[in-house]
Image (tube, rainbow, N blue to C red):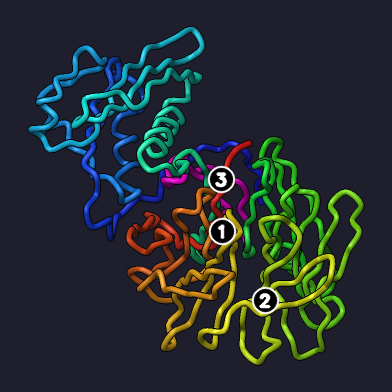
Amino acid sequence: MLILAAGMARAELVIEITQGADNPTPIAVVPFGGNGGLSENVSRIISADLDRSGLFESKSPENMLSFPSKQADIFYRDWRILGTDYLVIGDIQRSESGYVAEYGLYDVLQQKKMLGKVLSVGPTGLRDMAHKISDDVYQALTGIRGAFSTKILYIEDMGPSVKERYRLIKADADGAREQLIFKSSEPLLSPAWSNDLTQVAYVSFETSRPAIFRHNLITGKREQLTNFKGLNGAPAWSPDDSKLALVLSKDGNPEIYILDIATRALQRVTKTHSAVIDTEPNWTADGKGIIFTSNRGGNPQIYQVGLATGRVERLTFEGDYNARPRVTPDGKSLVMVHREDGVFHIAWQDIQSGDMRILTETWLDESPSIAPNGAMLLYATQHNNKGVLAAVSIDAGVKFRLPSKQGSVREPAWSPYAK
């Protein structure tokens, strides 16, 4: 086994956009001035980010009539001829501490500046700079905070011929800049971000039974949190990162518990009889309840329990199988694995009204994880007989895949925003 906190690997996930919005907004991201000779093509990364949202269609530099890098050089007629609604320009200069970018967003039809900023990064921060500019442009044009600067976790299975075949990987939200966090010859499951982004909890089978570990992403230090007999699984951080909701079967059937990380005090949340399985906990947005999967009604369905009252309420009624719930950041809806005609899809449901819609058309879809802006979600699915990650917008209008060049990937976890 190997602990490696900052081992930069090659970018193995590649993006294949499979469905975009019906009428994406045309936008031009002009190659930034001073971009030549830099280690990253910032304008190209911004274009790829915006294209991946499905809401925008960026113009190729090959079709551009001019290449302004400051406002005085913009001839709006050039961009109207190109059919562009919005224009992003910028200039990047080296500084003593790294790079400084001055960039702006312009409305071509109204010939006005919408956004203008200066951004500084360190010597290795050009890709971070690009994602931050993408976030700013996306928010200025949609009113929704961008999530291009966030991170993802996933489990990669390199296959039986590789000794330490199971790998916990951290990457940018676009799959770039992979970092190996941990690898093992035994399965790894259920990675979960702490809300401060400094820790990851996951299940490892490296001991004689499944156990929950937490891994400090800053120091690389690992710590085993549970060692109970039976099942130890599905960790989920509380909103303040002081507790983990998890599943234990130490007293018989799988039940939901809460572990206080500082004191190691254990609170049992659900109490059912031996034939019931309560699993896959996820905290409500306010931290006052747990949403989980249970077969207490005969089939797997989604339930919510209030931590102060212990009152349990069933949330899903459509279909005979709903599992792996994840609450949206606004706390108003959830996504889940929903079975329809024997095929497992990802579905969205309004918690208050119960209205449900199916988001995916692939098969064996599992493990949904929602972006912190609530606009997209990642999930694991099958493509060409291999496990891949895929993404879909909450309105199902935008879809793309992130297949791996090597092993199968699964169990994605989209990070919260950095605080």
Q: Residue 303: which disc?
A: 2
Q: What separation in Å lies between label 1 and label 2 (alpha carbons)?
A: 15 Å
Dot 1 falls on a residue whose secondary structure is: loop
Dot 3 falls on a residue whose secondary structure is: strand
- How far across and how far down the image is residue 389, in percent? 43, 60
Q: Are marks 1 and 3 in contact (CB under 8 Å)?
A: no
Left or right: residue 295 compared with residue 28? right
Q: Is residue 407 above or below residue 336?
A: above
Q: Is residue 9 above or below residue 14?
A: above
Whether the magenta-drawn stretch holds residue 231 is answered as no
| Earlier residue among tags 1 and 3 | 3
Q: Residue 180: which disc?
A: 3
Range shown magenta: 163-185
- Of circles 3 and 2, which is in front? 2
Q: Are marks 1 and 2 in contact (CB under 8 Å)?
A: no
**Where, by quadrant of the figure, is residue 206 drawn?**
bottom right
Tag 2: amino acid: Tyr
Dot 2 falls on a residue whose secondary structure is: strand
Q: Classify the position of the C terminus by image quarter.
A: top right
Residue at 7% in and 32% down: 81
Tag 3: amino acid: Leu
Q: Is residue 170 above or below residue 226?
A: above
Q: What separation in Å lies between label 1 and label 3 (alpha carbons)?
A: 28 Å
| Earlier residue among tags 3 and 2 | 3
Q: Is residue 10 visible?
A: no
Whether the magenta-drawn stretch holds residue 171 is answered as yes
Residue at 25% in and 16% down: 71
Residue, disc 1: 328
**Where, by quadrant of the figure, is residue 394 drawn?**
bottom left
